[in-house]
Amino acid sequence: MAQTDEFGEDLADFVRRVAELKAARSVPADDLPTVLDAAIFELDHVAGQLWPRYESLSSTGASGVASVDRQEQQLLKALFQRVPVPVALVDRETVVRRLNFAATSFTGVRAGYATGRPLTGFLAHADRAAFRSQAAAVARGDGDRSLTVHLQQQPAVPVRATLTALRPSGEPRTAVLVVLQPADSRVPSPERVPGPVPTLTETTRHAALMDLVDAMTTALLSGPVGDPSGVLERAAGVLQGRFADWVVADVAGPARLSRTTVLAPSDSVEGARGVAAQDPAACPLVVEAARGGSTALPVRPEDPDAFGRDASGAPILVRANVTSLLCVPLTTSPGPVQGVLTLFRSGARRAFSMAEAQAMDMMSRHLSLAMSTPR
């Protein structure tokens, strides 16, 4: 039964990746060879891995997994936690299942926070796709892998990540054991790991956020209030460029949302027209924010249709090369949602951080007050 379940998961992963390749057809022509290489790789995977496993399951059936003594499991868990090397146990999607004590000190991320979140979220932006691909290969039995990555909190320090497959007892899925070590030095002991002292980069980013909040407050106080479209247009002018590459504003009307403002980079004029002509009701992220009143902060959105498609049928997130987005409902508590503000970052620009999302949440309340104040 375990092998059958694993085969079904591999097949489902393959179908999902095929859907992503279909969506990638709208990328620029210069990037199509990369998409073609990925498609050929997936076909090789089907011919060399999935089909032989299907034949084997059809002829012999699934085999069970022997149970392990409970005391031995407890001993192994204790060893995992106490081993003086940073180790993480993740699934094929790099979602953290366990993080030992050395790994929490090495990465600066608490185990309780990391569990249930992708390990790629703690890596530098450029390393995530490669790490995710290697983890998937190890999980499906293609052998151990090793690659150099960079932690998001310390992007200048190279880290060697070694990945090996592991089958937890009594479980149908193959997990991936990840060992993290500095690429050019020994693993620091917990006593030598520096505390969470703000770096110059963090201090600079905090100052930039305070400047942004000040600019937003100035823009709201220096113009008329009570006009939702006008307020959002001024706010979009502050955010576009210095905080986000794209700014899309939707105002809640008596019956439905209406798109009032779309600001995009100068080289995306045609794409901006397509986004401006789009019905906000066709954007799942916008609809969810307007309905539930909660902020969405996806990094490298997995679903290419999360913001809908343009008139040509191309996913907007793919066409705009969105690598991080922030979808914020405009509301005061208590009170209805008066609109939704969506921000895109594209290309090599750094992803939105939790601190930036918190600052944007504060500014959204100020925007909502300016929109609802009588003229």
Image (cartoon, rainbow, N blue to C red):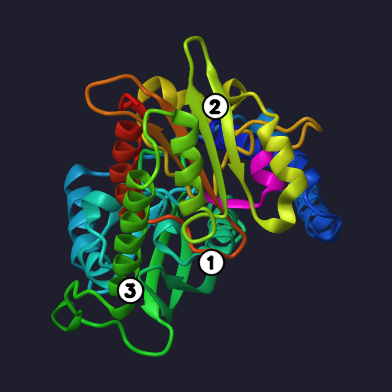
Residue 164: assigned label = none
Disc 3 on helix, strand or loop?
helix
Q: Are marks 1 and 2 in contact (CB under 8 Å)?
A: no
Of circles 1 and 3, which is in front?
3
The amino acid on which the numbered mark 1 sits, given as a three-letter code, is Asp
- Going from N to C along the chain, the mark reached first, 2 or 3, is 3
The amino acid on which the numbered mark 2 sits, given as a three-letter code, is Pro
Of circles 1 and 2, which is in front?
2
Q: Which residues are magenta?
A: 315-324
Q: CA distance from mark 1 to mark 3?
A: 24 Å
Q: Are marks 1 and 3 in contact (CB under 8 Å)?
A: no
Q: Please give the residue where the numbered disc 2 appears in the rendered image.
A: 284
Relative vertical location of residue 315 with respect to residue 219 in this rendering, above or below = above
Q: Nearer the viewer, residue 363 or 358?
A: 363
Q: Please give the residue where the numbered disc 1 appears in the rendered image.
A: 127
Image coordinates for residue 53, horizontal then vertical, percent? 68, 40
* In the image: residue 86, left or right of residue 329: left
Image coordinates for residue 47, horizontal then vertical, percent? 79, 45
Q: Quadrant of the C terminus?
A: top left
- Going from N to C along the chain, the mark reached first, 1 or 3, is 1
| Quarter holding residue 11 | top right
The amino acid on which the numbered mark 3 sits, given as a three-letter code, is Thr
Q: Please give the residue where the numbered disc 3 appears in the rendered image.
A: 204
Q: Residues within 10 Å of mark 1 (few under 14, many from 20)?
A: some
**At 58% across and 20% down in the image, what residue appears?**
281
* In the image: residue 201, left or right of residue 70: right
**At 19% across and 80% down in the image, what residue appears?**
194
- Going from N to C along the chain, the mark reached first, 1 or 2, is 1
Disc 2 on helix, strand or loop?
helix
Q: Residues within 10 Å of mark 3 (few under 14, many from 20)?
A: few
- Is residue 21 rendered magenta in the image? no
Of circles 2 and 3, which is in front?
3
